Image: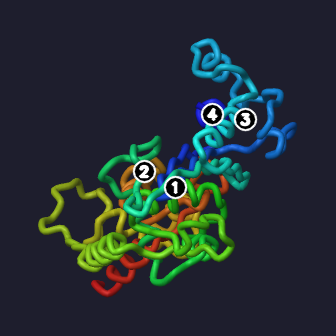
Amino acid sequence: MNAIAHRDYTSNGSVQVMVFRNRVEIWNPGKLPNQLSLDDLKRTHESFPANPVIAEAMFYAGYIERLGTGIPDMIQHCLDSGLPEPEFIQEAAFRTILWRKTNATEQPIEQPTEQLAGEVAGEVTREVERVLLIMNREMKRAEMQVLLQLKHDDFFRTNYLLPALHAGYLKMTEPDSPTSPNQRYRLTTKGMALKKDLENKIRTTILTPHDTPYDAPHDTPYVTPYELDQQLILVLSGEMNRPDLQKKLGIKDTKHFRNSYLKPALKKGWIEMTIPDKPKSKNQKYRLTEKGKLLKKKLKEKK
């Protein structure tokens, strides 16, 4: 209930729940209000809900008993059950750690017990694919972001790191100390298998020339033996904005460029936005992903 009432709904991130052998972690987009400190949370305090309308509705519906007492009650319930006091950590997202009772026969739980917002069972997102393709050793979070050219920690954690951990493709080198400054991540056996499969698919991408001539009017522009979005891959160098890409390809019709070149390349994971959380930004540019770089190399070899 706290996560729903207090999350930052302007963030593209989603509430994340991770179930480990010895604890449950809840990661929630948002920050504490300026009027409260972490110590203030542990005692009855004045309520400063991030979303007052939602909080009020929950109160009248009976989901919230009294405003400002939720966390003190949570702490007391844990202590009454013989559990350590929960931990509350403010980073890019607000984190709550609830400790669990464990025994010698209990097996680690590697995945969440339920699917959360932003996750689709059985699907591997393009973001997770990108993470796996850059992993060739144990890496710190900051190293991974540099390789992926992602500057925003919260965006990376929510859309790349946590989904890969939840799905069992990555694991922590220090799972019992998730906030350790020495924390690194590595591929699991499942992750290595998927990475190998992804690399094989990229290497064997079929670059099919058009088998038959187009029955088109004489003023129809000549189409090269590559798909339109593959032409975009060949001209994209570094980071480029849409007008520059259109100019490189000699295309004046912006709608045609978006629908036939840009969107297919984005959908296939060959290119990415430099400002993914603001797709309509005037400063938006595009660059090749690792998958796109491999494809470009393959395309050039086929020339």
Compare marks 4 and 1 and give the one earlier in the sequence.
4
Whole-angstrom CA distance, mark 1 to mark 3, is 31 Å
Tag shown at residue 159: 1
Q: Quadrant of the C terminus?
A: bottom left
Relative image position of residue 178 (x, y in whole percent): 60, 64
Compare marks 2 and 1 and give the one earlier in the sequence.
2
Q: Are marks 3 and 4 in contact (CB under 8 Å)?
A: no
Asked if 265 appears above or below 258 in the picture, the reply is below
Whole-angstrom CA distance, mark 3 to mark 2, is 26 Å
Asked if 6 appears above or below 287 in the picture, the reply is above
Asked if 5 appears above or below 105 in the picture, the reply is above
Q: In which quarter of the image is the N terminus?
A: top right
Tag shown at residue 72: 3
Taking the spot 32% from the left edge, 61% from the top edge, the residue there is 221
Give the camera-side residue of 254 and 150: 150
For label 3, the crowd category at 10 Å Cα-Cα, with few meaning under 14, some 14 to 19 and many 20 or more, is some
The residue to which callout 4 is attached is 2
In the picture as drawn, the residue positioned furthest to the bottom comes out as 301
Is there any visible trace of residue 279 in the rendered image? no
For label 1, the crowd category at 10 Å Cα-Cα, with few meaning under 14, some 14 to 19 and many 20 or more, is some
Compare marks 4 and 2 and give the one earlier in the sequence.
4
Tag shown at residue 79: none
In the picture as drawn, the residue positioned furthest to the right comes out as 35
Q: Is residue 194 left or right of residue 237?
A: left
User: How many numbered discs sit on the rendered protein?
Assistant: 4
Q: Quadrant of the rendered structure where residue 166 is? A: bottom left
Q: Is mark 3 on a helix, strand or loop?
A: helix
Q: What element carries label 4?
A: helix
Q: What residue type is labelled 1?
A: Asn
Tag in front: 2 or 1: 2
